Amino acid sequence: MKIKQFDRVRLKDGREGDVMEVFGDQEQFILTIGDGPHDWEDIDVFLDDIEKVIYTSED
């Protein structure tokens, strides 16, 4: 699975977030999760934490 900056992904724990940064060779990511500005949070995740890509950004 190829994950790019600004893709929307679903984590294995059910949360969804937008990829803000991709590190290494698709090894680690910073995601922004939450429903809106009132509860947005940036988290670090690894490729193994991601279940699937829901929306892929345009190239």
Image: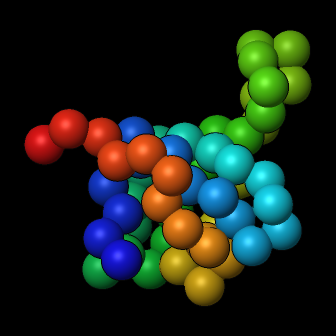
- Vertical placement of residue 45 versus 1, above or below: above
- Vertical placement of residue 29 versus 34, above or below: below
- Residue pictured at 30% horizontal, 80% vertical: 25
Which residue, as the protein is rendered here, is positioned at the far bottom? 48
Image location (x, y in percent) of residue 5: 35, 47
Locate the N terminus and report the quarter of the image it occupies. bottom left
Between 48 and 14, the one lying in front of the other is 14
Q: Is residue 40 visible?
A: yes
Between 15 and 29, the one lying in front of the other is 15
Q: How many marks?
A: 0
Taking the image as shown, residue 11 lies to the left or right of residue 31, namely right
Which residue, as the protein is rendered here, is positioned at the far front? 54
- Residue pictured at 61% horizontal, 72% vertical: 50
Image location (x, y in percent) of residue 21: 43, 50
Q: Is residue 30 visible?
A: no
Which residue, as the protein is rendered here, is positioned at the far left? 59
Quarter-of-image position of residue 44: bottom right
Quarter-of-image position of residue 48: bottom right
- Vertical placement of residue 37 versus 33, above or below: above
Locate the C terminus and report the quarter of the image it occupies. top left
Colour mapping: rainbow
- Residue pictured at 79% horizontal, 33% vertical: 34
